[in-house]
Image: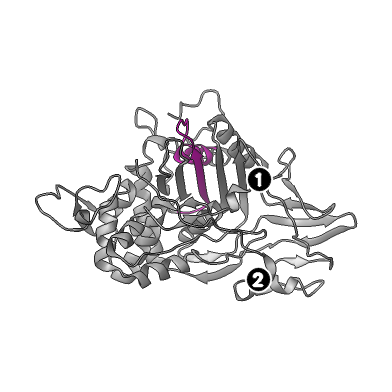
Amino acid sequence: MRQWIAIGAAVGLVAVTLPMLRKHDVELAGLLAKSKIETNGGPVVTREVTPPPLTDVDLTRIDDRGNVAIAPAHGNRRAELTVVPKYQRAAMAFMRQGRVPEGAVVMTDIKTGKVLAWASYVDQGALHDVAAEATAPSASVFKIVTATALVEQAGLGPNTKQCYSGGEHSITARDLVDNKKRDKWCATLAQAMGRSLNTVFARLASRNLDRGALEGTAQKLGWGQDIPFDVKLAQSTISLPEDELGFARTAAGFWNTTLSPFQAANLATTVANGGEMIRLSIVDNVKDEDGEIYRGPTARLPLKRVMSEQTAQAITTMMEQTVESGTSYKSFHDRAGRAYLPNIRIAGKTGTLTKPTPEGPFYTWWVGFAPSDKPEIALSVLVANGAKWRVKATNVASDMLRVYFADKDAPGVRSPFDTGSRARR
């Protein structure tokens, strides 16, 4: 089991949402100064109020019992959400059934940026929004960042071949050195992504990237940045070490970065959109006792391009290996090798790290989108287990995608809730 040394100070929540978006979301910043603005599908404040309309929207208390998901806001205000109740209920049910101590599921519509599920689950202790926090290590999800840098900065691709040895649970200085006698296995970069081969990423990064290239790519993809959204979010963090070994370990996903489930979903949405980051939104409207005071976006809102379309396609090709033959294969196929989502191509990335204590937490991630050739939804799942566990993030992700595509009547796909459905594991 790979070991994670906790990063020094805990990540604090970023202090503000709309007023601090500035150049990233100029339209939203303007909402605070005008009672009503005309936008091309952007958000609108329909009546000026104090405090601003989105103040205190509480996504830990989503009511998904009706046809519309609702969250309480400041005072007597009520926020109607873009969340689809059936997907929200499914996400909470999977974590509850799996006896997950803490976890989160975020699902987005790739075309519009609307959040379809925002499930934050805490089995014990004080309720908090796991989906908005960035206290979990990025783990091997960070390989997406490293792969992006290798493609854009070093000109590598899915078919780049690297031989390797060691690195399953840790990376040592010896693992960074090519050695024909020790290196008994070889893999392409795509295979390394699918099977999460640490040594391949560590060697390629140490040989082809410098600190500035990797950190710059991470920042473009959202690490260390305030990403526009409707509620307060913690920044995903990165702190790259100066030494070669520490750098290589970070590039492989071992150290020095954290990730929020929101940011993970944002990353998957960005890759699925061909490298263009769009603004995600979860609030459809806000009302007080006198009526509507805010109306959410009605159109896709591009923010910026963070990678080329060619790079996004290369990353997609790599991520497809995760489900086809890599670390998620068992979760997406039954014991006879039959796919739970036949004829649907899926791009994903798993991550696994644990704190150096017997009790955990034992973190697992699944981040991806589907169909990978004609993307509809992006999904991030974080599960923080204890020493004993029943499900990992990859299991929950498989189930969530089955719920979605069964709901869309995809041929051959059955929801895990169907009584005749094949066993997941």
Q: Is residue 204 left or right of residue 377?
A: left
Say whether disc 1 or disc 2 marks the residue closer to the N-terminus.
2
Point out residue 284 in the picture as x, y percentages from the top left corner: 72, 56
Under circle 2, the secondary element is helix
Point out residue 368 in the picture as x, y percentages from the top left corner: 46, 50
Residue at x-position 59% and y-position 58%: 12
Is residue 115 shown above or below 332? below
Q: CA distance from mark 1 to mark 2?
A: 28 Å
Q: Residue 192: within the magenta? A: no
- Mark 2 — residue? 20
**Which of label 1 and label 2 is nearer to you?**
2
Q: Quadrant of the N terminus?
A: top left
Is residue 99 shown above or below 64? above
Classify mark 2: residues with Cα within 10 Å, few (<14), some (14-19) or many (20+): some
Q: Nearer the viewer, residue 216 or 422?
A: 216
Q: Which residues are magenta?
A: 374-403
Q: Is residue 233 visible?
A: yes
Q: Is residue 370 visible?
A: no
Residue 324 lies in what quarter of the image? top left
The amino acid pointed to by label 2 is: Met
- Mark 1 — residue? 84
The amino acid pointed to by label 1 is: Val
Is residue 181 shown above or below 359? below
Q: Is residue 267 left or right of residue 184?
A: right
Residue 26 lies in what quarter of the image? bottom right
